[in-house]
Image (cartoon, helix red, strand yellow):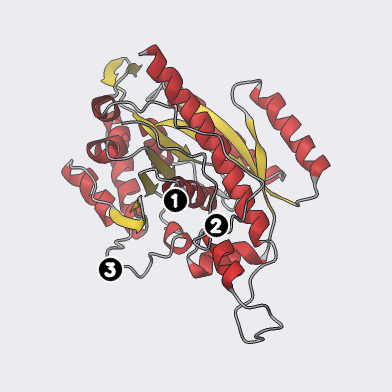
Amino acid sequence: MSWHDFSRPVTLPSGRDPLATHRVVALDTCRWPNRVAVRLALGANRIRGHEVEAPVLPNAIAIANGKGGVGKTSLSANLAGLAAHNGWQVLLVDIDPQGNLSSDLGYGDDPGYDGGQALLHAVEEGVGVAPLREVRPGLDVVTGGDATDLLEDRVRRQLYGGDTNALYSLYHALAPVAGRYNLIVVDCPPNMGALVDLALSAVSYLVIPTKGDAASLNGLTRAAARFVNTRRTTNPQLALLGVCLFGFGSQDTKLVAKARGQLEEALEGIAPVFETFVRHARKAPDDMREMGLLAHEYLERAQGAPKWYENRDAVQFSTAAAGVASDYQNLATEILGAFAARQNAVTAAA
């Protein structure tokens, strides 16, 4: 299976390109691991003196930070949605009991939305998970919600009983279906608990979004500590793909440069701080979640809407729509480019 081309910009049905000045990196030269490698990629590690298998999903990225409100769910939804929009087959996994992806993608009223029951069932029965199909063309979702709390309780009980293999529960639920997808994105909860351990024990890559305030950076520190612990215990293959910035003003160049410099110094070259940051905007993110639209979809809707002076009763869209859509497009380009480069390196070494 070859990689799909992510070199096309987001283009509206009308033919108008909202990001006409931007062209993303082409991934058409990347070679995709075969299905056996995707489903059976295994490593070995020692945990508390016992030999255990350390299975990972080579096509999976977790999005995590130890603080809420830093852009995790928005990034997960837009990254997965843009990859699917550009022809990739994508699975988005919600392991946050808040289940906010249902709002971001607008599937909360779908009859198939089960609040995490499918994932809980898969873990309990030892079978592959059955995702909600075609939330967008090419995009399937394993939903989260109240049942995800029950999953965390189950894993905690197993861990307290000494069953460290419980940390591979998410891997075993996703592995039977992983070969269908070019990319799996896991949206993690903000608390650094058992659910995050499940995610980091299953995926190959971690992306940490953060804002520039002290609380967000503290959350990043907590996520980084979990990353280090996971590499020492359950998943020595886990790699930090990069850190991305959220919540700066579009003109905050000095503040962004300062934050990026501090992060790069702390990372010591282990991973990049992605060049693109997602700007602060008040109305656009609220509208997007209320309408169940991704950033490029919100822009499309905005461009097709009447102006306020043409119809004072019409829905008014944020003037930041184009900027926010461009930010997510550019950031997705960087993240998926880094992801593809890693996959190329693995394939070349095989």
Contact between labelled residues 2 and 1, with CB atoms less than 8 Å apart: yes
Q: Residue at x 56, y 39 (%)?
A: 333
Q: Can you give x and y, in whole percent of width and height, for residue 131 in the image?
A: 28, 52
Q: Quadrant of residue 315?
A: bottom right
266 vs 61: above or below: above
Q: Which residue is mark 2?
A: 296
Could you tell which of marks 3 and 1 lies nearer the N-terminus? Answer: 1
288 vs 227: above or below: below
Q: Secondary structure at mark 2?
A: helix
The residue most toward the top is 349
Q: CA distance from mark 3 to mark 1?
A: 23 Å
For residue 96, side relative to residue 246 (left or right): left
Could you tell which of marks 1 and 2 lies nearer the N-terminus? Answer: 1
Q: Residue at x 55, y 68 (%)?
A: 301
Q: Which residue is mark 1?
A: 85
Which mark is in front, 2 or 3? 2
Q: Can you give x and y, in whole percent of width and height, for residue 278 in the image?
A: 65, 48
Q: How many marks?
A: 3
Q: Can you give x and y, in whole percent of width and height, for residue 175 in the image?
A: 26, 35
Q: Which residue is mark 3?
A: 111
Q: Secondary structure at mark 1?
A: helix
For residue 86, side relative to residue 126 (left or right): right
